[in-house]
Amino acid sequence: MGFNCVRFTWPLYLATNDTLSARTVRQTFQELGLHDTIPRIESNNPSIVDLPTIEAYKAVLTSLRNNNVMVILDNHISTPGMCCIYDDGDYFFGDRYLDPVLWMKGLRFMATLSTGFDNVVGMSLRNELRGPRQNVDLWYKYMQQGAETVHAANPNVLVVMSGLDYDTSLSFLQNRQVNVTFTEKIVFELHWYATSSSNSLSEWVNGNLNDMCARVSSKVEQTSIFLRCQGFPLFLSEVGVDQTGRDENDARFFSCLLRTAAMLDLDFALWGLHGSYYLRDGIVHREESYGILDRNWTGVRNLTFLQRLSAIQSPYRGPGLNETGQHNIIFHPLRGMCVTRESPIAPLKLGSCEQSLSWIYTPGKNLMLKKKKKKKKKKKITWRYLQTDGLGKPVTIGRKATTWEVISASKMHIATNLGGIQACLDIEGHQELVAKECKCLSGDASCDPSSQWFTLVSSTRLTKPA
């Protein structure tokens, strides 16, 4: 499915409570009353059913290593169970279930364990700190101590630090940086869901989508993305939507999220892989609608979602790429595709971003392609422009220099002026690119502009267009 890393959670007590870690997988399921599940584990994974829990955990790390999958160990919670309630006693240092001394003992144990697995590339210190007792000074005190603890036990892993307010805010780092003895190993993490930066559960539906995307993106910039300008890596360690399609808020939010992730070339972890839980909130085999796998773990829940997500799974910039010069791709978040064409004479349409056309956006607001032609053994560089002949007409490549402006609050409408009418890039039919009158620019909450949402993504990745 295109993933190369697992954010592998662990509860603090697994690393600090010998009774818990020594309990076998079979005993755990028996104590939970899940007797019907045991024969299935015996059938599918007989090698782990009678292992102590900590050894079963290590067996998963081994399997991931054998399949060339990286791992980030994530201290998700203290007591085994489901995270995260605002006042569950497991939310901040000094709370009932989060003793800082015990926490550092657990970090030391897991960091030491990870030295035996070269596929463990990072350790996330603590998931979703939150609650009424969260405190910036205590955050610095304990997160710095935790980072030093991990580094001392395993100097080869990245140290991933979460913020406050359920991992949505790192704004306090604008004026005060982390002080540790090592360098170039700190990564900060961010969680971003439809509800993360909203004032109400239905705000994505009740507000104009351009305005909502602009407001939320600006807030995330202020609370976390600013760290990239300070030279720190930022890891989008939890993002997800209801993949059943039942949640309209999630559906409208996801195009906005994809645009930001593509533009910033963010590494991310999706919540989650699992299609259901053995037991959650007292319900056996409860479905996880955010899971990529279906309820029975036998297939992909939503192939369209997975296809859209694939557009941000490979980096657009950075080391290790088969690189070319810096250029732009035209990305369409609603489809998770980019503007390309099947042959030099074919119409422009949406297709795989691996085959995207490479555009230059000039100061004069032209979108140009550089085309080389052979002429008497010399290569003459000629230019071709993105252009259109009118409303409802195809958007093509030709010799006419056309002005295209990025408009609307979301900065995702690419528009040109056609006889006093603003015409935007849009799609119709079999994903062909056309020019249509710009819609939903402001005000109307019922209007969905996402078919006209395109964004220019800076890339150095070598693509292979027709």
Image (cartoon, rainbow, N blue to C red):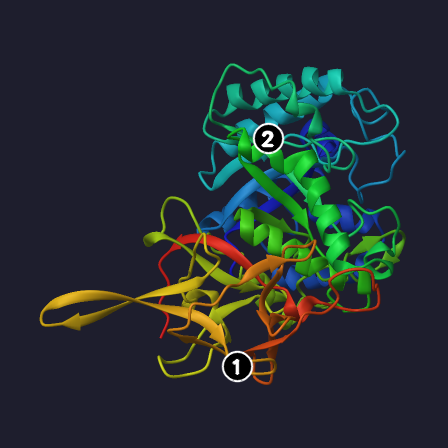
Q: Quadrant of the C terminus?
A: bottom left
The quarter holding residue 254 reads: bottom right
Residue 388 rendering spot, x and y as whole percentages: 51, 77
Residue tagged by mark 2?
110
Residue 69 rendering spot, x and y as whole percentages: 49, 50
Judge whether 41 appears above or below 199 on screen: below
Residue 52 visible in this rendered orientation of the protein: no
Q: Secondary structure at mark 2?
A: helix
- Numbered label attached to residue 352: none
Q: Amino acid at mark 2?
A: Met
**What residue is drawn where x is 75% and y is 17%?**
138
Front position among marks 1 and 2: 1
Q: Amino acid at mark 1?
A: Pro
**What residue is drawn where x is 75% and y is 20%?**
136
Residue 88 rendering spot, x and y as whole percentages: 88, 34
Q: Secondary structure at mark 1?
A: loop
**What residue is drawn where x is 37% and y is 83%?**
345
Q: Is 154 situated left or right of 378 in this image?
A: right
- Numbered label attached to residue 394: 1
Q: Earlier in the sequence, mark 1 or mark 2?
A: 2
Front position in the image: 173 or 235: 173
Residue 22 rendering spot, x and y as whole percentages: 69, 36
Q: Is 354 situated left or right of 203 in this image?
A: left
Judge whether 39 appears above or below 80 on screen: below
Front position in the image: 134 or 411: 411
* Distance of label 1 from label 2 (alpha carbons): 57 Å
**What residue is drawn where x is 17% and y is 66%?**
379
- Residue furthest to the front: 419
